Image (spheres, rainbow, N blue to C red):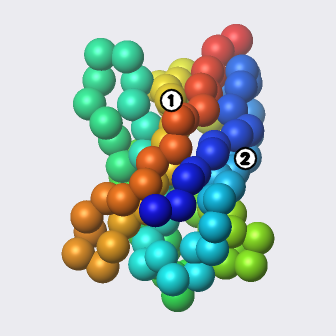
Amino acid sequence: QVQLVESGGGLVQPGGSLTLSCQASGSISSIYGMAWYRQAPGKQRELLAGISVEGIAEYEDPAKGRFTISRDNVKNTVTLQMNSLKPDDTAVYYCVTYNDDGDPGSRGQGTQVTVSS
C-alpha cells in the first residue's frame, strides 16, 4: 500500500479558501479511487469527495458547490480545493485510497483545518 501525507491545512477566516494536498509515496495510476473525508471532534467521520482513476469526481452534500477534488497520476497527488469555508468546516481532513468495491485502503495522518475569525 502507498503511504499518504496530507498538507495544506491551517487557520482561515470564514469565507476564505484552502487547498489541501495529498502526496502518495508511490504511483497512484493503478489505484481505483482517491477520496477526502473529515472528522470533527465529537462528530462522525464525513466523506466529502472521491475521484476515480479516470478522473470522475463525486461529491457529498457538505462539499457540493464549494469543494473541488482533482488527482494527478503523474505527480501522485490528490488535491481538495475548498472555497467559501465556514466554521462548520473545522475538522481534521484525511486522504484515503479505495478499490472498485469501495473498500478503503491507505489513509494519511490528516491535516487540521480551522475556520474561525
Residue 98 x/y as whole percent: 37, 66
Note whether 37 is above or below 117 in the view shown: below
Q: Residue at x 44, y 72 (%)?
A: 33
Q: Label 1 to label 2, Cα distance in Å?
A: 14 Å
Which residue does the numbered mark 1 point to in the structure image?
A: 92
Q: Residue at x 70, y 40 (%)?
A: 7
Q: Disc 1 residue type?
A: Val
Q: Is residue 85 visible?
A: yes
Question: In the image, residue 1 lies at what x, y percent?
Answer: 46, 62
Above or below, 32 relative to 114: below
Q: Residue at x 33, y 73 (%)?
A: 99
Residue 81 in sight: no
Side of 43 relative to 69 (left or right): left
How many neighbours does mark 1 have within 10 angstroms: few (below 14), some (14-19), or many (20 or more)?
some
Residue where numbered disc 2 is placed: 19
Task: Judge the density around disc 2: few (<14), some (14-19), many (≥20) Cα neighbours within 10 Å.
Answer: some
How many numbered dots are placed on residues in this image?
2
Helix, strand or loop under label 2: strand
